[in-house]
Amino acid sequence: RGAILLDLLVYDAIGVVITLGVVLTGVLNALGWGIVAVYLFFAAGSGLLLLRERPFRSARTPTAVGAP
């Protein structure tokens, strides 16, 4: 799950940078800001979920000696 979130974060961050550059150079009109906002929204969401993700734990947990 962490690899997918990292991939989505990188994809959306690249989308923000490229779309922002295109909007600022005038290739896209004012509606291009909506695309920037969507990329930024998903990049922030992926980043937040990636920061909150717990480290991977093994399915096999050690048991104490003598435990049932």
Image (cartoon, rainbow, N blue to C red):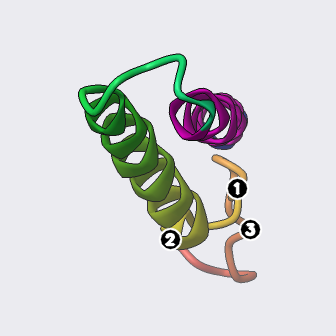
> Given contact means CB atoms under 8 Å apart, are the residues at marks 1 and 2 in contact?
no
Q: Amino acid at mark 2?
A: Arg
Identify residue type, mark 3: Pro
Location of mark 2 (residue): 52
Q: Position of residue 11 (x, y in %)?
A: 66, 28
Task: Check disc 1 and report the residue beneath it.
Answer: 56
48 or 65: nearer the eye? 48
Assess disc 1: are there few (<14), some (14-19) or many (≥20) residues with their C-alpha within 10 Å of its C-alpha: few
Q: Which residues are magenta?
A: 4-24
Would residue 62 be found to the left or right of residue 25 on screen? right
Callout in the foreground (1, 3): 1
Main secondary structure found in the magenta portion = helix
Which mark is nearer the camera, 2 or 3? 2
Residue 54 occupies quadrant: bottom right
> In whole angstroms, how far apart are the C-alphas of marks 1 and 3?
15 Å
Residue placed most toward the observer, 40 or 68: 40
- Which type of secondary structure does the marked residue at label 1 adopt? loop
10 magenta-colored: yes
Which label lies toward us, 1 or 2? 2
